[in-house]
Image (tube, grey):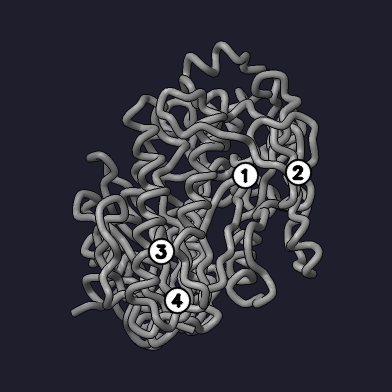
Amino acid sequence: MKILISGATGFVGQELGLYLARQGHVLHVLTRDPKRHQGMLPFPAKLFAWNPDQEVPPAEAFDGVEAVLHLAGESIASGRWNPSRKKAILDSRVLGTKHLVQAIGQFGTQVRTFVSASAVGIYGDRGEESLDENSTLAAGNSDLSAPAVEFLAGVCREWEAAATEGLPARVRGVRVRVGIVLGWDGGALGEMLPVFKWGVGGVLGSGRQWMSWIHIQDLVRIFEFALQEQSLSGPVNGVGPEPVSNAQFTQALAQAVKKPALFCVPKLALRAVVGGAAQAVLSSQKVLPRRLLDLGFTFEFPKLESALGALIPESSDELLIRRQWISAPLDRVFGFFSSAHNLERITPPWLNFQILTPQEQKIEQGALLDYRLKIHGVPIRWRTLIESWEHGRSFVDTQLKGPYAKWHHTHRFEALQGGVFMEDRVLYRVPFSVLGKAVGGAWVERDVGRIFDYRKKVIREIFDQ
């Protein structure tokens, strides 16, 4: 199936695009800046420019498209909720959705399914009440001066109305009301994890408010299920089957990172930090995925403990993951990474990186590689062991001597739609234990991220030649 996606460059969108590409779907992507994202997504796609607040998407984006997935919207998690921020949140969802529905009517003659994101905020603050798709919605108020909970409910109501009003009768419409998404590189967990790793996490407000959460892998499966299940239309709660209180969530996350969670953040303190958005954080929504369960959808991560266990390293190590899709055959890509000396080409020049191992050294399981580099001007020697090697699929290098207390780097390769999906997964530990992490943890994290972002850019340039 050929699918058009908006919001594919975001936290959920990248995971969803990769999942759909692995299922064999052909993807078109709408983005404000195609030049910036070309070659940087972890899946193959044709990119089209679109400013959702101001215009309908281009007609050519709908060429052969049978389904549309709409995820685009300004993040509600970053920045204080002043009037301009609220306006961006509202317009990016309502105007963008209206423009997309208009384009489906004008250009999407082959489109038969439209799946649009929404949010559980549409139910408002409901205390202990169990909510499903048949529950009464909050009245809401999208006026920019409205309190945060009312504002979010109002935005969601207008958002869903925009997804249905004017949608052609030939198109089946599904609205996925998304809860708190837990993923390895962003979303709510990305915000909370550093705080809990430092042992300063805690309950928000009373801790009694309900949190309707979902693992990102289950969420992308819900979107795909909505595409395929022809009997499904209307609202669907995109949440896991077992919501928890904030106190329960806090305890589970603290256990996952093996740190205490002794603190409590009072309402007044939370409001001082995040402003009016604190009301949304403290609101209670005990939402259940009734329609999904009735249709036989099964969750891979129904319990919070298993979801967190799949996302958080068992030790105190830091985790970095970078993914990209490379437009080249698997044998060429893997062959490039089979030569240690190509590391010099993809390492940032500011590291003064140099391979000391002779070029004739064969890269295979058990091979030892020696490097020389400078970290912020300090000369470093690094020795690496190729711990495992599976030709054409993966290899692992681990530091025997070098600047980190631990460095375990897994390279994975997968043939995907005429190219290669590549993933770097690094588990690393800052030296000097707790002191080293306290003094330089954030600094090291930033440096490691910059190094792999540079690698990603250069790899794309090499294989685009």
Q: Secondary structure at mark 1?
A: helix
- Mark 3 Cα shell of 10 Å, populated few (<14), some (14-19), many (≥20): many
Q: CA distance from mark 2 to mark 3?
A: 28 Å
Instruction: Say which of marks 2 and 4 sits in front.
Output: 2
Q: Earlier in the sequence, mark 4 or mark 1?
A: 4
**Disc sitting over residue 131 in the figure:** 2
Q: Which residue is mark 1?
A: 120
Residue kind at label 3, given as amino acid type: Val
The residue depicted at 74 percent of the width and 54 percent of the height is: 289
Quadrant into which the C terminus falls: bottom left
Residue kind at label 2, given as amino acid type: Leu
Question: Residue 368: x percent and y percent?
Answer: 44, 68
**Disc sitting over residue 3 in the figure:** 4
- Mark 1 Cα shell of 10 Å, populated few (<14), some (14-19), many (≥20): many
Q: CA distance from mark 4 to mark 1?
A: 25 Å
**Disc sitting over residue 177 in the figure:** none
